[in-house]
Image (tube, grey):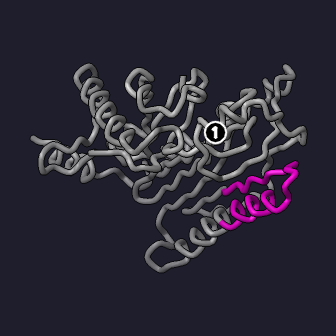
């Protein structure tokens, strides 16, 4: 059986809607409990963090960042809070959509633009959800939508924000988008800005395929959809592939649920060894 056949078998395996709905809702609630306990502990121990941010969505190279390294960070206290929360619940449907708000930016035009964007995106998600549950063929179907955001890295130089979304229907899917922000130079990093040219796409893709094959060889529970000849599957990352830089200064490439693996694998990530990409990096300012 080839990869395409395995993928089709997996996707065609029936899962009772009620069971899938309950399981995913339970997992979501457990995640929320874990985040609440972690936050409570941070508050009690006085470790809650605040960051000075001035976000510019520009494609600036790390070389320029090196030259700007001595520029002082703005002293305004920037916070990310929940501005609005949309909720809905009945016997078959549930939604909890959190809208973040950035406060404390000196550039109020930018601050307003970001907050309007967050509000527009999440409001649309919620309105689309309400529209879907109102249709005749879905009024008794189990549907749920959850969105959230969190800070996964906060250092003197970098802040990594994750925007999470979980959608549950006959099946469910999880997705996350990362923003890696240079706090000192006040910009949002792009994947392409880390490299000298577009060769990073091929280099990183080959390493990820190698990691996939190695994981599957060592663990029978691991499965990835890898293109082989004419078969469908993962071939290459996109130029703007979802990524972040972790606490060790390593580049992490992220794929949403079902992108490159069965749903049971969830969101999958690959840490790219720095030695694989060091010759094509603009500098070692971000990736160590």
- Closest to the observer, 17 or 3: 3
**Image quarter (top left, top right, bottom left or bottom right) of the C terminus:** top right
Q: Is residue 43 left or right of residue 258?
A: right
- Closest to the observer, 136 or 250: 250
Q: Who's the residue at 90% across and 38% down the image?
A: 75
In reply to whether residue 103 is colored magenta, the answer given is: yes
Q: Residue furthest bottom?
A: 136
Q: Is residue 102 left or right of residue 178?
A: right
**Position above or below: 16 against 244:** below
- Secondary structure of the residue carrying tag 1 is helix
**Position above or below: 215 against 61:** above
Q: Who's the residue at 72% across and 56% down the image?
A: 99
Q: Which residue is mark 1?
A: 64
**Image quarter (top left, top right, bottom left or bottom right) of the N terminus:** top left
Does any portion of residue 189 appear in the rendered image?
yes
The residue carrying pointer 1 sits among few (fewer than 14), some (14 to 19) or many (20 or more) residues within 10 Å by Cα, namely few
Q: Who's the residue at 32% across and 30% down the image?
A: 207
- Closest to the observer, 127 or 100: 100
Looking at the rendering, the stretch of residues picked out in magenta corresponds to: 97-120
Give residue 117's position: percent from left, percent from top.
Answer: 69, 63
Please identify the quarter of the rendering in which residue 76 is found: top right
Q: Residue furthest left?
A: 1
Give residue 46's position: percent from left, percent from top.
Answer: 87, 22
In reply to whether residue 211 is colored magenta, the answer given is: no
Give residue 127's position: percent from left, percent from top.
Answer: 63, 72
- Closest to the observer, 264 or 257: 257
Please identify the quarter of the rendering in which residue 276 is found: top left
Give residue 74's position: percent from left, percent from top.
Answer: 86, 40
Q: Who's the residue at 54% across and 62% down the image?
A: 92
**Position above or below: 238 against 210:** below
């Amino acid at each position: 059986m080839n990869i395409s056949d395995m993928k089709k078998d997996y996707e065609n395996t029936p899962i009772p809607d009620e069971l899938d709905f309950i399981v995913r809702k339970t997992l979501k609630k457990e995640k929320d409990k874990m985040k609440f306990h972690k936050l409570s502990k941070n508050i009690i121990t006085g470790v809650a963090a605040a960051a000075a941010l001035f976000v510019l969505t520009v494609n600036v190279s790390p070389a320029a960042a090196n030259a700007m390294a001595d520029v002082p960070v703005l002293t305004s206290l920037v916070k990310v809070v929940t501005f609005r929360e949309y909720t809905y619940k009945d016997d078959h449907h549930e939604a909890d959509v959190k809208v973040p708000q950035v406060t404390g930016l000196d550039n109020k035009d930018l601050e307003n633009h970001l907050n309007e964007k967050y509000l527009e995106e999440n409001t649309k998600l919620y309105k689309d959800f309400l529209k879907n549950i109102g249709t005749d063929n879905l009024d008794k179907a189990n549907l749920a939508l959850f969105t959230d955001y969190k800070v996964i890295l906060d250092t003197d130089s970098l802040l990594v924000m994750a925007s999470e979304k979980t959608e549950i229907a006959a099946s469910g899917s999880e997705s996350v988008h990362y923003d890696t922000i240079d706090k000192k130079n006040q910009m949002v990093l792009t994947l392409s800005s880390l490299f000298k040219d577009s060769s990073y796409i091929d280099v990183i893709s080959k390493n990820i395929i190698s990691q996939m094959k190695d994981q599957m060889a060592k663990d029978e529970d691991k499965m990835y959809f890898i293109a082989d000849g004419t078969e469908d599957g993962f071939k290459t990352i996109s130029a703007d592939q979802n990524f972040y830089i972790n606490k060790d200064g390593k580049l992490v490439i992220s794929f949403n649920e079902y992108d490159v693996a069965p749903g049971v694998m969830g969101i999958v990530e690959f840490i790219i060894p720095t030695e694989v990409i060091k010759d094509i990096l603009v500098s070692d300012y971000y990736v160590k």
